[in-house]
Amino acid sequence: MADSLVLTGVKDIKKHTGTEMLRINPKGGGDSFKLARWWVEGGVSTTYVTATVFQVTVGGNSVMLALDTSSSSNIRIDHDGSFNFTFYGINEVLRGALYTDAFELIEHYVFPKISGGQVMTVTPAGAASRPGTTPPVTIGTLTFSGDTTANDLETKTYTGSKSGTAGDVTYTITSDDANDTVAGLDVTFNGTGNRILTMTATSLTATDSPVTETLSVTVS
């Protein structure tokens, strides 16, 4: 995917062609962020710049694009879908910066009024990494299905399903009654009373592994 828009002033958006770039406001209110001067090396700057900030999201990951704007600014921003940006028609915008979603600096941009030519991209020492654009592999929501009543010494078979994209999910069941026998997803109930069965879904590739869900069963 790709996205493009024109920013006028500090907040007015025109000719927006996609949904990846979203202008955001600071939690304290207002249209602009106050960010330490990102181009100052050798320590955190105590001087702040007024910036328009866009949250750019692809595949569940986000970056923050900051531009030092004013009421007379005008700039077109093109996003290639992989957290790379091209800038056109730059007016009254001197600098920009790309951050992680935790505002760790990835790189910053020096625009023609300062660079005297093309947009210059600067990667500072110790810069954060640009995130990937592939959605994370997850188990997601685990659904534990099967009968909630059983007879003593009866065997019931249960099933598990998940909402996520992980393809290597394994399901296991445990019972809170040590007398019950569990073989795979089959449970043989030994003795009457109430049970709590716990299903655990595990995956070597999912970022949210393991995921658990419970099911109450009454044995008579």
Image: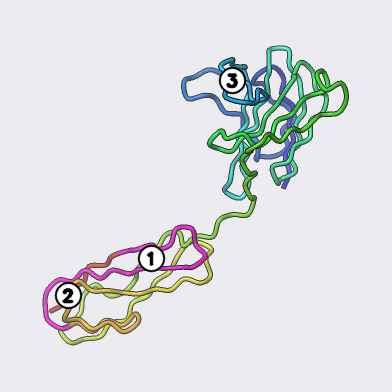
- Distance from the alpha carbon under mark 2 to that under mark 1: 22 Å
Q: Is residue 210 magenta?
A: yes
Which residue of the protein is positioned furthest toward the top in this rendering? Answer: 71
Q: Quadrant of residue 78?
A: top right
The image shows residue 30 at horizontal and vertical percentages of 53, 17
Position of 1 relative to 209 (above/below)? above
| Residue positioned 67% across, 29% down in the render | 97
| Mark 1 or 3: the one toward you | 3
- Distance from the alpha carbon under mark 1 to that under mark 3: 50 Å
Q: Is residue 169 magenta?
A: no
Q: Quadrant of residue 41?
A: top right
Which residue in the structure is indicated by mark 1?
143
| Mark 2 or 1: the one toward you | 2
Tell me the quarter of the image containing the C terminus.
bottom left
Which residue in the structure is indicated by mark 3?
45
- In the picture, measured across the screen, residue 190 lies left or right of residue 6, that is left
In the picture, the disc for residue 177 is 2
- In the picture, measured across the screen, residue 213 lies left or right of residue 56, that is left
How many numbered tags mark residues here? 3
Residue closer to the observer: 50 or 139: 50
